[in-house]
Image (cartoon, rainbow, N blue to C red):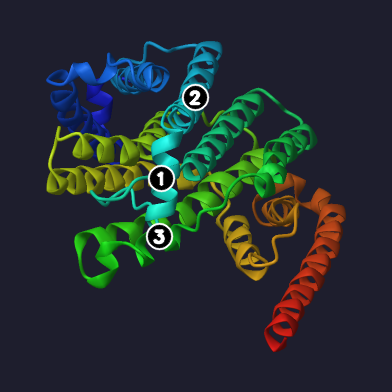
Amino acid sequence: MAFTELAASPALALPVAGMGVFLMELGSVVATNTDMFTKKYGRAHRVMGAMYLLVLVVAFVDLAAGFIGTPSDRYTFDVIMGVCGTLTALTAAYDFRKAHQRAKTTTDASGALDADKTVTTDEMVEHAFYQMLNLAQVMFLHACGAERSMWRRLAYSAAATATSLFRGDIPVNSFSDNYAAADGAKNPGSATSWLYWVKKHQYVFYKHFLLHGLNVSVAVAGGDVVGTPAFRCYWLALNAAYVMEFFLQTLVKKGYMGQARMLRMNASLMAASTLAALPVLARVCLPAAAVSLILNYTNRHCGVRGHEMRNTAVAAAVAMWCCGGPVAAAAAPLLGLAMVYTTIISIDTAGCVFSMQHAGKK
């Protein structure tokens, strides 16, 4: 993709420009403090962090130059990005585990946007899990690019969603707790409190429209998504946003930048990632994504292992019915199965509510 193409497409030009400004400002800070990557303490994480920054820069240059041209090259690069993101989180959890464990006993919530908070080991492990979800999704989307069988694509979607089965084994940190217990919560109108609120709802939007919604839509309709300029821009912004809030907080703690600048950079990255997501929505079956969102809220308190699989099965059936085109007739058997799943969800939800009410009476 050439710069002239970006300029001719405002939908892509704005997020790409936003990412460029963000990376240049970040680069100006890193270039004058390169010693942060050479210190002995936390060496593995420092090396992985430097590698991840390099991967993000390569991804940005590719948006303009398009030198990662073949599907196999894009697949290799996307896997490298996913692995680097996962290892960056895991090495942070391991290398700084003592400091993170102290943070767990001294703070109510981490608050990656607060200068006086520190993320915990559990949160970094959880973050690594989310990075692995990203890796599973991009591998699924690559697999669907040349797959002509809808049923195989649906099987790939189920395999990608199966990673959620391990969610119960991963520490859970409520995002709401981060801003409910943060200093900014004392002033609901503060920039910090507002950014926490926006981040939470960005994640809800991402999960149901750009994770489950996009997956089932591609499973039903097929086609190459990962090779499109819109997706390349979105994928860069998403991966950057996943890591940068932690890295920017570290830069503040080490005195490399001020708190106000960190909040401004976070806000600019959030805006760029939101703008980058909008063109990708053209590939999403919106009714299916909406169903995923509704089902998530009907059984989110029950903690039943596998509910993500059931929710996605229902969303896939809706995608077949609403957005499947010629294959809509084939949706009838799966829709029947979806109704069974919906019944099970209802039973789970009712049992969960009854159990919570009964426990409250005790």
Task: Evaluate if marks 2 and 1 touch, with contact meaning CB atoms under 8 Å apart.
Answer: no
Closer to the chain start, of discs 3 and 2, is 2
The numbered disc on residue 87 is: 2
Residue found at x 20% / y 48%: 263
Q: Quadrant of the N terminus?
A: top left
Q: Nearer the viewer, mark 1 or mark 3?
A: 1
The local secondary structure at tag 1 comes to helix
Relative horizontal placement of residue 169, taking residue 129 as reference (left or right):
right
Estimate the x, y position of residue 39 in percent, counting from the top left: 28, 16
Q: Is 282 on the left-hand or right-hand side of 52?
A: right
Q: Looking at the picture, which amino acid does disc 2 mark?
A: Leu
Residue drawn at the location 79% of the way across and 37% of the way down = 151
Question: Which structural element holds mark 3?
Answer: loop
- Tell me the kind of residue under disc 3: Asp
Q: Earlier in the sequence, mark 2 or mark 1?
A: 2
As drawn, is 298 to the left or to the right of 190? Answer: right
Q: Which residue is mark 1?
A: 102
Image disc number at residue 108: 3
- Front-most of 129 and 297? 129
Q: In the picture shown, does residue 29 fall above or below 186?
A: above
Residue 288 visible in the snapshot: yes
Q: Earlier in the sequence, mark 1 or mark 3?
A: 1
In the rendered image, the vertical position of residue 63 relative to residue 326, given as above or below: above
